[in-house]
Structures are given as C-alpha cells and as structure tokens.
Image (spheres, coloured by chain):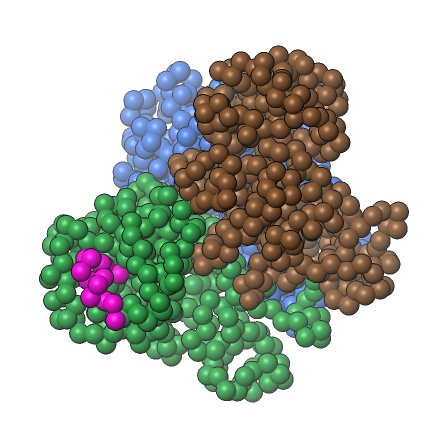
Chain colours: A green, B blue, C brown
Amino acid sequence: MVKTKEILDILENYDKDNIAIATVCSHSSLQIFDGARKEGFRTIGICMGAPPKFYDAFPKAKPDEFFVVKDYKEILSKADELAAKNALIIPHGSFVEYLGAENFQKLRLPTYGNRRVLEWESDRDMSRKWLESAGIKMPKQIKNPEDIDSPMMVKYYGAKGGMGFFVVKNYSDFRKRINPAEKYTIQEFVLGTRYYMHYFYSPIKSDGYKLSRGTLELLGIDRRVESNADEIFRIGSPTELAEAGIYPTFVVTGNLPLMIRESLLPRIFEMGEQVVEKSLELFGGMIGPFCLETVVTDSLELKVFEISARIVAGTNLFISGSPYSDLVDEKLSMGRRIAREIRMARDMDILPEVIS
Amino acid sequence: MVKTKEILDILENYDKDNIAIATVCSHSSLQIFDGARKEGFRTIGICMGAPPKFYDAFPKAKPDEFFVVKDYKEILSKADELAAKNALIIPHGSFVEYLGAENFQKLRLPTYGNRRVLEWESDRDMSRKWLESAGIKMPKQIKNPEDIDSPMMVKYYGAKGGMGFFVVKNYSDFRKRINPAEKYTIQEFVLGTRYYMHYFYSPIKSDGYKLSRGTLELLGIDRRVESNADEIFRIGSPTELAEAGIYPTFVVTGNLPLMIRESLLPRIFEMGEQVVEKSLELFGGMIGPFCLETVVTDSLELKVFEISARIVAGTNLFISGSPYSDLVDEKLSMGRRIAREIRMARDMDILPEVIS
Amino acid sequence: MVKTKEILDILENYDKDNIAIATVCSHSSLQIFDGARKEGFRTIGICMGAPPKFYDAFPKAKPDEFFVVKDYKEILSKADELAAKNALIIPHGSFVEYLGAENFQKLRLPTYGNRRVLEWESDRDMSRKWLESAGIKMPKQIKNPEDIDSPMMVKYYGAKGGMGFFVVKNYSDFRKRINPAEKYTIQEFVLGTRYYMHYFYSPIKSDGYKLSRGTLELLGIDRRVESNADEIFRIGSPTELAEAGIYPTFVVTGNLPLMIRESLLPRIFEMGEQVVEKSLELFGGMIGPFCLETVVTDSLELKVFEISARIVAGTNLFISGSPYSDLVDEKLSMGRRIAREIRMARDMDILPEVIS
C-alpha cells in the first residue's frame, strides 16, 4: 500500500484552485462528473481505448477531458501525468474492480476516502467482524455445508455485482451446484424485502446528525434489480425450474427507487452510526459514501447482508435529488455531495482529512 | 367524541397568525414539517421520551420545536399546553395507532380533517357499506370459511400495516392458519397489480375538478412493498413453502413510485368523486388526503380493497413532487398540500371548514 | 397512404407562428400538452363524446381547446377543421389504435414523425427483419409449435398493451391455450430483467451523440407493470395455477422508473444508433421518440423483444425529468422534447423534415 506521506507530498504540489475530479468512465461516472462541475471542479474521464461516445448525449455529465489508457493498469504507470493535471481520484466499484484491489492500494494519486477500508470490506470474514462488533445484525453464517437445513445463499469470494451467488436448500443442492475450486461463504437467506441505504459520512462537517467526529447523512434508498432472479417466477418456481436445470441468478442489471417506513429511520441512522464509529476505531474511519445492504423482515428487523464502502450505482437514480436528499439540500446527488465535501475540505485547507 | 363546539371554542382563542402545525414524529412527519414550513407555518414534533436524533440529518424537515411526552396517551392530558402553542394537529396512521382510535376521537385540539371518518373507515363492515353504496367495486367477501374455494385474503380486524393478513386457498388452509380468538374478514384475492392512489379533497377550493362542493386532486400513486410477500418467490412457491411451514406475510416496509395507464384516469377520478360525495352524505365529508388501495385486473377493472382516510406513507416518495402533482403545481408534496389548505382556510377565515 | 405532397401543401397554408399541438386525450397526452405549452404552443385535445373532466385536476396539462368527435374515425372527415386551427398531430399508441393503423396512414394533417415507420413496426415479420438486419439481438422465433421445448411467449398479431400474450412450455400447453383462428408468433422467453429504453432521434439537431444524420438521445428507462403476471406469484407458481385453470396475463397497467448499469450505456446507444441508421436506409428514417423493449440477461446481454416507434406511456413517469434527461436539460419530458423539436424545426423553417 502506498504510504500516506507519499500521497500528501503529491497533494502538496497540487494547484488547489485547479483540482480536477477524475474517475473511470463507468458505474456512477455520469453523476460524479455532473456533481463535480456543479461544485466548480474540472473533470477528467479515464477510459480504455477511446472516449466513450455516449457522453455526447449527456452534455451536463461529459467530462472536460478524457484520459485514455490502453489498459486500466496503465493508470498506475501514468499516475504522474494525472498528478500533473491535479487529479483527485473518486473511486467506485468498477474503478476498483478494473484496476484490481491490490493495484488500487498502490495508486500514487490523492484518492477520495480512506483506502484502508478496502481490506476490511473485501474480505467477507473481516467485514463480518467489523459489522458484528459494531452491533449490526447479519444473516447467520455456517461453516459446514452439511449443516444446510433451510434456504441459504452461497457466495464465492470476490463475487462482483451478484455474479457467483446462488441459493440452496440442503446439502444435496449444495453439492450439485458448488465449484469446489472456489472459496465461498454460506449465509442464511433472510426472508423479507431488500433496501440499500445510501449513507454519507463526513468527518469535517459539524452541523447535522453528529457522530463522535463529524456527521452522518442518508441521501437515498434503492433496490437492486437482479437478473434473472427478479422475473424468473414468471415461468416457474425454483423447485420446478431446478428440475429443468434452470437456476435463479443474481446479477445486478440496474436499480429502482424506494422509500422505507419512516419509523425505521431511528434504527437506520443508529446502524450507520455504529458502523462508522467502529471504523474509526478499527482503521481510522470510513470516509464519504457507503451503503448498507439490508433485508427488512416482517417483524421490521433490519439485517445487513453486505456493506459497500464507496459510492454505489443505486445512487444513479437520484442525480437530481431523492426524497431523502431533498430534505438536506436541493438537487444533491451523491456525486455532488462528494464534490462538495472536497470543495469544503479544500476551502478549509484540510484536504488530507478526506483523502488517502 | 369531542364536541365540535369545544374544538371551535379552542380554535377561537388561537392566534391565527401564529398557528403551529403539529404531528407525531413518525409515518409521514418529514414531509408534513417540510411542507408546513414551506407554507409559512411553525412546526411542532410530538415525540415519546426524547427528540429523535434523525431529524438532525434532514434540516428542512426538522420541526421548530419538539413536544416530549412520556407516553402518547399524554397528548390527551397535555392538550392545553399544545393549545397554548396554537397547535393544529395533522393526523397520520401512526398518530391514530399510537394514541388509539378512541382517544384520538377525544383529543381536545383542532385537528385537520373530519374525525367522524374514523368510525366509517376502521370498521371493515362500515367501510364496505360506504364504498359499495358509493358505487365502488370491491373484492367479494364471504362469511363462511367453509365456502373458500379460490384464493382468499384473511384479515384480522384492526390489522395495521399489513400485519395479520394471510392468503388461503381452501377451508383446510384456513383452519390451519386461523387464530379463532380474533375477529376476521375473508375477501377474494383479486388477481392483478396493486396501485395506491393519493387523492386530496378540498371542500374550499373552487377551481379544478369540481365536486358538488369543493374540488378533487390526484397527487401521486405508489405500490406498497410488503415483507416477505414481495420477495418470497425467490425461494419457493406458496405451496412448496407451506410444506416447510413458511408463509407469505404482508407487512408494509416501504413504497415504490408508479404511474398508471392514462386511459384509467377518468375512472380513477370518478371513483374518488363517488367516495367523497357519499362521505358528504353519510358523515359530513372526508376532508383532505385519502387513499384508495386498488388492484387493476387484466381486464383493466379497478377493485378497491381498502380505503385510508388520511395521509398515507406512500406519499413520502413525492416530497419534491410526483409526475401527477407536477401538473398541479411545482414541488407539491401531500404534506405541503395539507399546509396550503390550512393556510388558504386561515386566510379566508374559514378554518372550521377543514378541521374538527 | 396520404401523399407527402398533400401534407406539405396543407402545412404551407399554416400560420407557422400559431401552430397548435394536437393529440387524442389519452396515453401520454398530459405530458404532450404540458410540454407543448412549456415550449410556447397552443394545444388541442381531441376527445370522443365530451371533454374528459380529469384535465381540470391538472391545470398545467389541460389543453387550451377540446376538439370533440362522435367517433375517432371522425378525425379523418374533420381534418379540414383541425387544419384550419393549424393543428400539428402528435401520434401515440392509443391515437393509432383508436383511429386504426390504415386510417392513421390516410390522415390529411401534418403529423409529427415518419408515418412510413408504421408498416415496419406493426408487422412482426417486418420489424424483426428491420431490427435483425440492424444488428440487434432478438429472442429466437420458431415457426412450428411442435418444436416448443422451453418457455416460449406466444403473441397474437396486433396484440396491444400486452393483451393476447401467453407463455407455454411445450406443445401440449400450446394446444390447450391457442385460438387457432388468430395469427400468432412464437418467441423464446428470454430469462432476465426487462428495461424499456426511451430514445429520441432528431434528424435536425447537430450537437450531441451524432449519427450519419442528426443526433440520438436517451431520456429515460421504465419497466412496464403487467397484470396479472407481476403479482400472480403471490398465490402460486405457473404450474400450480395452470392446474386450477389460472394463467398469467401480460396487460400493461402502468410503469415504474428504473436505471440501468452505466456500463451498458455504450451498447444501449449503439443499439439505438443501429436501429435508426437502418431505418434511414429502409424507409427514410424513424423520426422522434422510440422505445426498445429489452431483456437484460444474467450475462448482461441485451435482447430486444419489441420496438415502439413513437412516444411510449412509460415516459409519463418523467414529466419533470428523469435521471437521464436531467443530464441533457432541466425538466425535459419526452412530450416537451417533441414540442422543442417542432419549435426548432419551425424556427429553422424546416418543418417538413420532422413531419409527414
């Protein structure tokens, strides 16, 4: 991992009045560029091969400049060129995936957020340790597949965007479907309805929902649309389909907007608070956007089955504001909230507090 | 029930230029406070124990003042204190539930809407009588559980937020699941897709969709998200799951936004009109927001399975406007529409027409 | 079909500074009237019998004038009256359905878009030819029902709004359900999640996502809500229900808003581009709004099962903008985009390029 001192040295040489917000052209880049421009920043879109033509259709979200690489790994070797442009990196899921988690840790460019969160988030055992020690309820996990006696979700390590997930009901199901070459976890399938909460933690803003340090916001909620699980019921039940060798899959293809019962908000904020406070203790804090991926059961309990420690694609729904962010400020997308945080830190001359 | 004269006497003593909109801190309180402020009112959040911290995260919706009670029943005994603050109560589902329907009828504070609607709405027989006599089509109801020969929804009396609902297909199913100690109704399970229409009836506004007295608006449509019924298909069909003792439940956990076929709007307004006109006849009118909870069948028939005679939580989706309310006025949430009605009545000096 | 020259002669006599946007009062008329007014046009609502009262509830979308006909066919015989009012027709699905496709082709009034698209779109063989020759992937189609060996969707010719669709799994299913008197197609049921993309093709706008001529936009995405298919799982699986003679149906009752994975946008634009370019080659171009109705599979492939070559009702969700159109311009509904295109063409004095 790159040393904090190296990053601070690079930042030291930046022209702070001319910072460019840079990210990879995918995932949530439209709102990141749109939000950055609205907060007064230049924008750089990092892309492979050639600038994607689709930005031409979205003038408000087209980056000021494209930075073309042959291969995403080239971002590492061309970091100096980006630094010369005063580039401040906004990481998102595809950015980390395309570059590789290890490479991302090595990237010699000022990056929004705390990169140390990655090791806690990407390892299922460590993220469970983090969340459970924070007081979060998670689906039960079992070690021995022979113990499967109710619906369970099996997830391969490092599975992305819902690929490599499947549901089994017993050991025989499990044996039929598992690839023994891969590392996996087995988690209780919690019955309920899914809600993905979009939190934002600012270590530097002092008015609002206060934590031991900084403040917490909730800017939106979505539900992921999963292919084919969300529509497969149209042709048959899981048991009927399994006989024909057809299985539900959980690949995220998009998102739909949701509100949650207002009476659950106290618990939702408490959960966000617990996770942030524990992160401050464990690794210096999870800075900026994060998402708790929950199931709400019919007894109105919230169980968290995963955490994402950066901007999630579900926030793309709320480019002009959500019913939650509209109560904070007008037209506040997550992309814009991130840019505003950077602007605030820049103006207060405390950028090191929000980058790594 | 508190007498109208008592309420009017209390109101008489109010400083009309300094009315405070007050409600219980739950359900749809964020938009009620946000809307009230936008229409120029002070706001009071009634809460139990201590002010909920989550309002700090939503500065636009944080009430100007919290009114703390030890127990919601205390609102009754502290009514004078609230009256001294010129509090005008906006009731919502949780307000009525927490206080209890009978206590709500006794509350000695000016309350938006007609409290007499409660007796017609909360009793399933009376609400059916009201709606059917208004010309509304409802799911068939059967008295004798032995007659169950197709999918039927069983609902316990006073079941709230979808708790205490279940589906049965025959008498044997019914016997297996019923709690004989509770009062219930048995209603045909109508096949189709659910739409929850957010109407607003103003007895005092004269331009718009005219009724015999006042006007009718449609400000939004949502679909309730029910746990676990909305996602249980992922692990099995109802029959398969019943063998494992797992049953779908219908607890409302949130809402998602919807539009309905434009060709159904004439019938949707006609239905709203019929229900309001009949309410004027039966009990002096259902004032303000109400919701018809419908199933649209594949022959495009609308069947109403329930009515809510006050603001529903589904309107929380539209804090900055819905595709329907945007055609009425900009950024018109239901909370704001209510506040605007009170402001209009105050300015015209006819507040008694919209409170009870 | 009416000759282009006739239409241009009619248009020649129009007072170009006083054009009225006219459409039938249904489908997407609210946003068409709202958008037209926002772009500075007068509006005419064509209706049968009497003006629908529901427009009174939506002041921003109420047409300036109603044009009442006894029967929709009367629009043909009264075309001169509408021409005298400088009426420019915006066609939508219900407009074409109510008038009849053949009559629509004969309508002697300037009509937005290219009417020649109708013959390519309404015939399933021709639309398949168009799309496949454009490089679009579609669900496989089989000719012989005896070959059905996996879930297949059977669609009657000219089926509207999802009526007359059904799913079968084998030949015996097919025989049980088919009406042999009707013409049908048999299409693979593609497993995945549905996304309906709202494109806009402008032959006259030059800045943006460029095609060989003009530019392409993406203004929104929805999912159709189908009755009863979307909620029938609550009572049983298709196989269980078939035993009781209950079958899923696919009648569109409304729409819900969606976002799609940002990484799919390059392919989505490419698809729109291919379809437009091929239409330019085949019949002079599909002008204005169109919709590709797709399934996104779990390998993130997009399969198109249908095309609509005019404004679709799903755009009704986005009367005040969508997360996509917000990146183009503020509050840009599809109805408004159409009106803006007409205004641009009028101002540039090239109206013939966008009407027929």
The front one of A29 and B263 is A29
Image quadrant holding the C terminus of chain C, namely top right
Residue lying at 65% horizontally and 57% vertically, measured from the top left: C138
> x and y percent of residue A282 in the render?
24, 73
**With respect to residue B239, does B211 lie above or below?**
above
Image quadrant holding the N terminus of chain C, namely top right
The front one of B157 and A32 is A32
> x and y percent of residue B9 in the render?
39, 22
Occupied quadrant, residue A92: bottom left
Q: Is residue A78 magenta?
A: yes
Q: Is residue C182 toward the left or the right of residue C36 in the image?
A: right
Residue lying at 53% horizontally and 43% vertically, measured from the top left: C199
Q: Residue furthest right?
A: C181
Residue lying at 35% horizontally and 47% vertically, measured from the top left: A61
The front one of A123 and B296 is A123
Residue lying at 56% horizontally and 65% vertically, measured from the top left: C298
Q: Give the range drawn in magenta.
A: A77-89
The mark total stands at 0
> x and y percent of residue C240 in the render?
76, 63
> x and y percent of residue C140 in the render?
70, 60
Taking the image as drawn, is residue B321 in sight? no
**With respect to residue A121, does C211 lie above or below?**
above
The front one of B79 and A18 is A18
**With respect to residue C68, does C296 lie above or below?**
below
Q: Is residue B207 magenta?
A: no
Q: Is residue B104 toward the left or the right of residue C138 in the image?
A: left
Taking the image as drawn, is residue B340 in sight? yes
Occupied quadrant, residue A1: bottom left
